[in-house]
Amino acid sequence: MIMSNLRYLIVNFGGPRSKEEIAPFLKELLCDRDVVATPLPDFLHRFFFSRVAKRRAIKIASDYDFIGGKSPIFEDTEAIAQAVRHRLKAPVLTFHRYLPATHAASLKAIRELSCDELRVFPMFPQFSYATTGSIARFFAEHLPKKVVEKMRWVKSYATHPAYVAAMQKRIGDCLKENQLEGRGTLLFFSAHGLPQKFVDRGDIYERECQESYAQIRAAFPECSHLLAYQSKFGRGEWIRPYTNEVCEQLEGPENVIFVPLSFTSDHIETLFEIEKQYLPILKNKGLNALRCPALNREEMWIDTIATIIQGDQLVSNKLLRK
């Protein structure tokens, strides 16, 4: 059912728009206790991880140099919102969780939006309390209750037919562009990792990654497939297998295509981590290793967002928080 006073909001991780924003981005990220869970009191957690963010910002500045000195996520998300706005002929706002410089203006726009219902689309296909759940908590803590109560979320779309089809088209296009056939090609699905303790406490992210993987790979029966998890940070066990360890052990087949399963936009984890850390391991073994681009600004992806956000599988903000 189409409502005349329906508005939309696309939420994403955010990413540094310049090298100067790397440190505040990391501080906002690492101080988020939905992302980095510690037993420390809040003030000690913020103190410790603020210092970690400063040190890490210096360390990874050269990584951002490799991808152009910034993350493309912000610009991609804004462009996608504009395209979805055109398709729906309705206001579509954006929110970038770890870009603190954008928060005041974004929250003001959300507060002042006149609507009966605000539909929220996360750019995270698989639900986690560390991504979609974190943003839901942020809104509950920083927006008036009457605004939050109008929100209706797309919790996840890990197996939504439109998302699955968009991913299958992206992979199919990559195979075609590189003149690869199914036989002799491995589709290496690499999703962002998550601490194992999050899953043990009931986070459904790993299960939804596995469900996405199963449905997407079904369109490529002649390829071989595997799923691993990347971007482990800090100590402790994360969900396995780890992408870097799989790369070290892998001996074939001849062609390997990395598929960014949980990443809808290319950013540091795909443009640098996969390109500079994982692909060279395989290439040094004589394998033809390539990276399939994320969905980014693909027309089919924009159509997919417009389709899913108009569906009826929606939940309230409070159901996304622990």
Image (tube, rainbow, N blue to C red):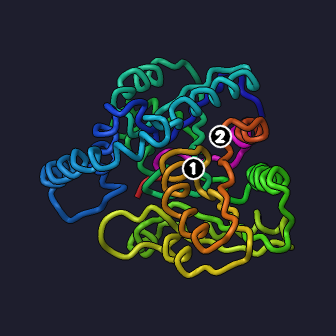
| Circle 1 residue | 124
Label 1: few (<14), some (14–19) or many (≥20) C-alpha neighbours in 10 Å: many
In which quarter of the view is residue 195 placed?
Answer: bottom left
In which quarter of the view is residue 159 placed?
Answer: bottom right
Amino acid type for the residue under numbered disc 1: Phe
Give the magenta range.
308-319
Quadrant assignment for the N terminus: top right
- Image position of 204 (left or right of 303): left
- For the residue labelled by badge 1, is the local secondary structure a helix, a strand or a loop? loop
**Could you say where residue 232 lies in the image, as x and y percent from the top left?**
41, 65
Label 2: few (<14), some (14–19) or many (≥20) C-alpha neighbours in 10 Å: some
- Image position of 5 (left or right of 60): right
**Could you say where residue 227 lies in the image, as x and y percent from the top left?**
62, 71
- For the residue labelled by badge 2, is the local secondary structure a helix, a strand or a loop? loop
**Could you say where residue 279 lies in the image, as x and y percent from the top left?**
58, 62
Viewer-proximal residue, 225 or 124?
225
Amino acid type for the residue under numbered disc 2: Asn
Quadrant assignment for the C terminus: bottom left
Q: Give the mark nearest the N terminus, 1 or 2.
A: 1
**Could you say where residue 289 lies in the image, as x and y percent from the top left?**
66, 63
In which quarter of the view is residue 284 placed?
Answer: bottom right
- Tell me if I can see residue 161 in this picture: no
